[in-house]
Amino acid sequence: MNTGSDGLEGGPGEVAVVEESNTGAADADRAKADGERSGRGLGSRAPAFIKRRRALHLSWQVGVFVIGLAVVAAGVVMLPLPGPGWVVIFGGMAIWATEFVWAQLVLRWTRRKVTEAAQRALDPKVRRRNIMLTVTGLVIVGALVGVYLYEFGFAMPWNIEDQ
């Protein structure tokens, strides 16, 4: 199967096919604009001498996949543990994106969604709503802590006597 990363456009072999949705033209225009902005098209970023030899290019892809998989796995492990889990996961995706078109498309989609979320978060109405929800939550938590302290008091663990 052609992953679209061998750089042989119009050459022999299989051709990568992209399915079109209802907004296929808009998505294609957006992807084209993303590619023009980044200055690079989709596909492998392996050196030319590696791309010329099929076996070497395949082993290069396997190496990139294994390294990216190790980084993504480390990020997944860091999610429940202390550490920058999501940053490491996206770092592994960036490693994969140096060689695989699907990872490049996932990163472009993620970048677009993060930018849209940041723009929405800067909207004054949304900011006011988020501040009000945060204040309400803090008041509720404060009330619950106050009720607990009134009912049971505050005793440090080293001051508790054996019962």
Image: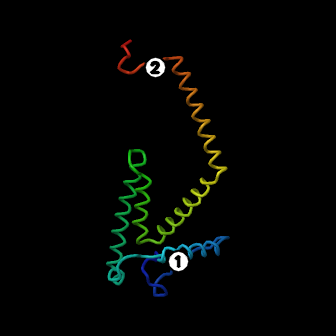
Which percent across, then down, holds residue 105?
A: 51, 68
Tally of numbered discs: 2
Query: Which residue is more in the foreground, 44 or 152?
Result: 152
Query: Which residue is more in the foreground, 106 or 13?
Result: 106
**Residue found farthest to the front:** 124
State the SS at label 1: helix
Neighbor class of circle 2 (other Cα within 10 Å; few <14, some 14-19, many 20+) is few
**Residue found farthest to the bottom:** 11
Q: What residue is rendered at 35% in x and 69% in y?
A: 62
Q: CA distance from mark 2 to mark 1?
A: 62 Å
**Residue found farthest to the top:** 163
The residue beneath circle 1 is: 36
Query: Which residue is more in the foreground, 127 or 58?
Result: 127
**Which quadrant of the figure has residue 113?**
bottom right
Residue 7, placed above or below residue 82: below
Q: Residue 79 vs residue 131: left or right?
A: left
Q: What residue is rendered at 38% in x and 61% in y?
A: 69
Question: Hey, what amino acid is under mark 1?
Answer: Glu
Which percent across, then down, holds residue 24?
A: 64, 73
Q: What residue is rendered at 59% in x and 31% in y?
A: 139
Q: What residue is rendered at 46% in x and 87% in y?
A: 11
Q: Residue 121 vs residue 58: left or right?
A: right
Which percent across, then down, holds residue 133?
A: 62, 40
Residue 1 appears anywhere in the view: no
Q: Quadrant of the C terminus?
A: top left
The residue beneath circle 2 is: 154
Which percent across, then down, holds residue 101?
A: 47, 72
Neighbor class of circle 1 (other Cα within 10 Å; few <14, some 14-19, many 20+) is few
Question: Hey, what amino acid is under mark 2?
Answer: Phe
